[in-house]
Image: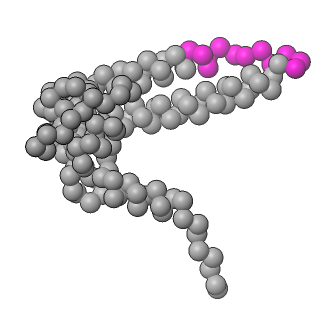
Amino acid sequence: MPRPIGRVAAGQVYLFGMGGSVQNKRTVLQRELGKVRIQIAKLEKALAEKPDYGLGKGNSAAAHREVDRALLRRLKRRAGNFERALSRLQQGSYGICERCGKSIHPERLVVLPDSKTCVDCARGIWLKRKRPKEASLE
């Protein structure tokens, strides 16, 4: 993802050096989706080639392959996030938190244009995942 060159002035964010209009947001989202799709295609091509699991070669090849598979899953999720962000943009709900319905801060959208939650809700999700489950006393 390119480094943001965003500025916040009077509530307006200029995403990646461009104005914050719907068309510019669409352009940014489509560009980022295109980059992710290119990475997916490269990884799928690499994974289509079977590594040599000959004597003494299989361990590192298998490990690299598993890392590539994990990266591919992550990239596919990210592509889905960009596609959903484009859909929300078309529906007029882009920049609105899917959990609480409040506006997502424009600076968050500069850094994470595919974000679907505000900082508070994202923090709550993160804390819920990281907090250990309380032991039952029953």
At 30% from the left and 22% from the top, the residue drawn is: 31
Q: Quadrant of the N terminus?
A: top left
Q: Is residue 32 left or right of residue 67?
A: left
Q: The C terminus is located in which quarter? A: bottom right
| Residue drawn at x 59%, y 74% as measured from the top left | 134
Image coordinates for residue 65, horizontal then vertical, percent: 67, 25
> In which quarter of the view is residue 101 placed?
bottom left
Task: Give the main secondary structure of the magenta stretch.
Answer: loop
Please give the range of residues in magenta.
45-56
Q: Position of residue 84 (x, y in %)?
A: 30, 38
- Along the line of sight, the residue nearer the viewer: 51 or 113: 113
Question: Is residue 54 something one can see in this rendering?
Answer: yes
Picture quadrant of residue 137: bottom right
51 part of magenta stretch: yes
Decide whether residue 17 is among the magenta residues.
no
Residue 136 vs residue 30: left or right? right
How far from the left and from the top, in percent, is residue 93? Answer: 19, 45
Instruction: Name which quarter of the figure residue 55 lies in.
Output: top right
Q: Residue 73, percent across and down?
A: 53, 34
Identify the residue at the far left of this view: 10
Q: How many marks?
A: 0
Instruction: Report the residue at 26% width, 42% height from top.
Output: 107
Residue 26 visible to the viewer: no
